[in-house]
Structures are given as structure tokens and as C-alpha cells.
Image: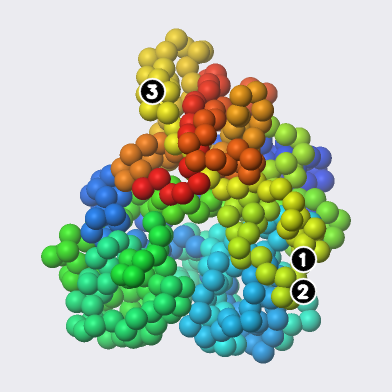
Amino acid sequence: MSTEALTGLSLQRALEQAGNPARMLRSLPAAHYTMPFQPEYTTWRDEQRAWKHTTVLYDQSHHMTDLYVKGPDVKRLFADLGVNTFTTFGKDKAKQFVACNHDGYVISDAILFGFEDDEYVLVGTPAAPNWVQFHAETGSYDVSIVRDERSEANPHGRLTFRYQLNGPLAQRILEKARGGPLERIRFFNMGRFELAGVPVRALNHTMAGVPGEELTGLEIVGPADGGPDVLAALLEAGTEFELRQGGSISYVSTVFESGWIPSPIPAVYTDDRLGEYRSWLPALGLEGFAGIGGSFASDDIEDYYATPWDLGYGRTVKFDHDFIGREALERRASGPHRRKVWLRWDQADTARVFAESLYGEPGQRPIGVDLPITSFTHFQFDRVHSGDRLVGLATFSGYTVNNGCVCSLAMIDEAAAVDGAEVTVLWGQDPGSPKPNLEPHVQTEIRATVSTRPLS
């Protein structure tokens, strides 16, 4: 359906007109969300090396939706919606918030900040803020909300700046910028201090790799009008440490080292209990206008849904409170699950696909492999086989110099999730797809090796 056809419609109405959610999303153009900041400052390869060897700075001030929720019922609201425990959550804490539908499928995940005991800020793609805002407005919760949209949808300007320092020299750069030592901040906790005369909050977390004793990742948040001064102070302090500014190209590729599967398809398209929510959502939002692509094709939208275990969030599911989806997840907990893994593409097959996509016979070429992001649509699902058996789905694919290979983040059966096991990824759009803007191509198999741990 075109943008014009969807304008003014709810998601529910658009689905009724389309007749089948999976076919509707599979027919949408292949497109990525465009990050609203500079693509490269040096080169994307140099910026990738920096988060491994020096430090990189990303300006995250513009591309995410921030939902501020404040009031005496803020913890109850999030506990009712999140699979996470909230027993000790509050001021200066943070967590990866995960919300599911009634059947235990993930609607979205996002970072939740505890600014105060009665004020939380949810930051991520629009899917999680949408779900929380709907329940805040329609449920019996004593909370107020302020929605701070991403820059391209926000004519009033953002409320805050957000800078991410990532790399082994992050702590030294920050201490030089503020002119003194930094008090220890525990992982996924926040500290408060001044930087360039601006009061900031700083969350200890890393976008690539794993946390260690040294502070290797810090997300710094403060009032928007102080952003330029803080940025200047960080860049000046980082000069002697070979700090790199990171552009949008390398930014997206951090997931291939952290292992975060970005933007799972929101499990909101089925279930009559979600009809009111679908009527509340606009058709032109993420849920209605982000396309499905890849070699896995199904007319059942639930075949694209994921559970928390599929995405590596099984450890976050805590049955110490009642929440939407609890009963379904309790039933699933002891059963078999898919597991999040890395699939290292075979070097020879990768080179073959590159060569054939450029020089092969017209009509017989595989789809091109762009770098560093090879995925060609928003929600990408490629078939993963062990022999003739479908064992899972590959999602986001791409390359970093630190991994030294093209890889896919995938969800595969636990029995197949064995380090060193060989599988194949079916690369290319399904032949019967109505997707309008992909180059003509044929599907091809790419051998890959399973890793249950980060590749770098």
C-alpha cells in the first residue's frame, strides 16, 4: 500500500484492507531507516577500529524516541508491561526493558532509565514507547507522559542530547574532559556530574563487546542546549587519545559485535485482545510501514514473531510479578527455544557472491552484498539450514573489521546452536515476493559457521 493510501488510517484499518499482515509487510519497499547524522567522519572502517583500540563517540541525540513517564504509578505501569523484575529498580538505574504480548511474543525492547524513583525515560524505536504510552493513556495509572520524538519528526527540537563513548580509552577521555577522576559507576547504573559546566547523567553500558573492569562504554545525557559545549569538551579531550567521531554507517554496525538483534518485528498484528491497540496505532508508523524481506517467506505473520529466548533475553524474564504474557512465558520456560547466535559467513562463498553480483550473467546474479550492512530491508529474515532442515532464521547481517568477516545475527534451534557447526544461509529475496524495488536476482546459498559467543 502506498503512503497516500495509508495516510489517516489506523493500523487496524490498514490490516483490514490488506487482508493479510504478512503479505502487507512483505509487499512494502525495501528500505532502511536513515540515521539523521553524518554518514562518516573518517571512514566507517576506521571508526569501527576505534571502538576496539581507542574510542569512538556517537551522537545519539536524534534518531530515537524518548518517552518520559512520571508519577506515583510509574513502577507499576512498567512492571505490568515488562518481563523484567522491578524489585530494586529506581533512581539512577537502567535496564533493557522487554515487553511481550499475551502469547509471550516480543513487542519490543528498549533502554529504560530511572531518572528518579517516580520518573522513568524509555528510549528506543517507537514500538516500545507506543506500547507503554497506550497503556498509560488507557489504563488506570496515575502517571503523566511527555513524548520526545526523533529529530526528523520533531519540529520543536529535542529535550536532551545523548552522546555515546565506546572503547578502551573512554574513561581516560572523560576524566580529562571533566578535569578529575570519575567515581565508579556500576554496569547499567548511572552517575551524575558536571561536564563543561553542564549537569549530565552517564549510563555505564557498552554498544560493542562486553563490559569489563575498565569503563569502556558510557552514554552521556543532558539538556539539549548544553550539547554543543559537552561535545566540544569531549572532542578536545579526546585528541591525544585518537578519539574518533562515529558516523551513521559504522553506528549501525556495532550490533555485529554486541550481538543485539535490533528492532524485532512487533508482535501486534494478531490477537483480538490487541484490536484496540491496533486502532490506536497509525498505519504510517513503524508497525505499519516497515517492510519484511529476505528468503524466509510465510503468509502467517506469527512465523516472524520472536520470544525473549530467541533474542537472548531469556535471563531477563522474571516471574516475581504479574505482567502481560506471563502465563504464556511460564508455559514456554521449560520447553525448547531458539537461541541467538552469530553466523560467520564462509570467506570463499562471500567472495563468490561479491563477484557474481558484479560480473555474473544478467538474470543470474545474486543480490549485491553491501558493506558494512548487507541486510536490504527493515525486518530481514533469511532461511538457515542444517542439511535439508530449516533450523532458524538469520536477521541482521554485516561486517566489521574487528570481526574480520561478514556475519549474521540469527535465531536457531538450540540443538543446532553448537560452536563450529556448519549451516547455510539462503541469501536473496523469496522469488514470489511482491516487493517492488529490489534488483532482479537469484537466491544463493552461503555456508556459515555457528558461534554462540561474540566473534571478536
Mark 1 surroundings within 10 Å by alpha-carbon count, few (fewer than 14), some (14 through 19), many (20 or more): many
Q: What's the residue at 71%, 48% (across, down)?
A: 336
Q: Quadrant of the N terminus?
A: top right
Q: What's the residue at 17%, 59% (across, down)?
A: 242
Q: What's the residue at 38%, 28% (across, down)?
A: 347
Q: What's the residue at 19%, 76% (across, down)?
A: 176
| On screen, residue 291 above or below 257 | above
Is residue 287 in sight in this rendering? Answer: no
Kindly check if marks 1 and 3 are in contact, taking CB atoms under 8 A apart as contact: no
**Element carrying mark 2:** loop
Residue occupied by mark 1: 326
Is 29 in front, or is 402? 402
Residue occupied by mark 2: 322
- What's the amino acid at mark 3? Ala
Residue occupied by mark 3: 348
Q: Position of residue 85 (x, y in %)?
A: 64, 74
Q: CA distance from mark 3 to mark 2?
A: 50 Å
Q: Residue furthest left?
A: 240
| On screen, residue 236 above or below 426 | below
- What's the amino acid at mark 2? Asp
Horizontal arrangement in the rendering, residue 290 relative to residue 344 (left or right): right
- What's the amino acid at mark 1? Arg
Picture quadrant of residue 432: top right
**Element carrying mark 1:** helix
Upstream in sequence: badge 3 or badge 2? 2
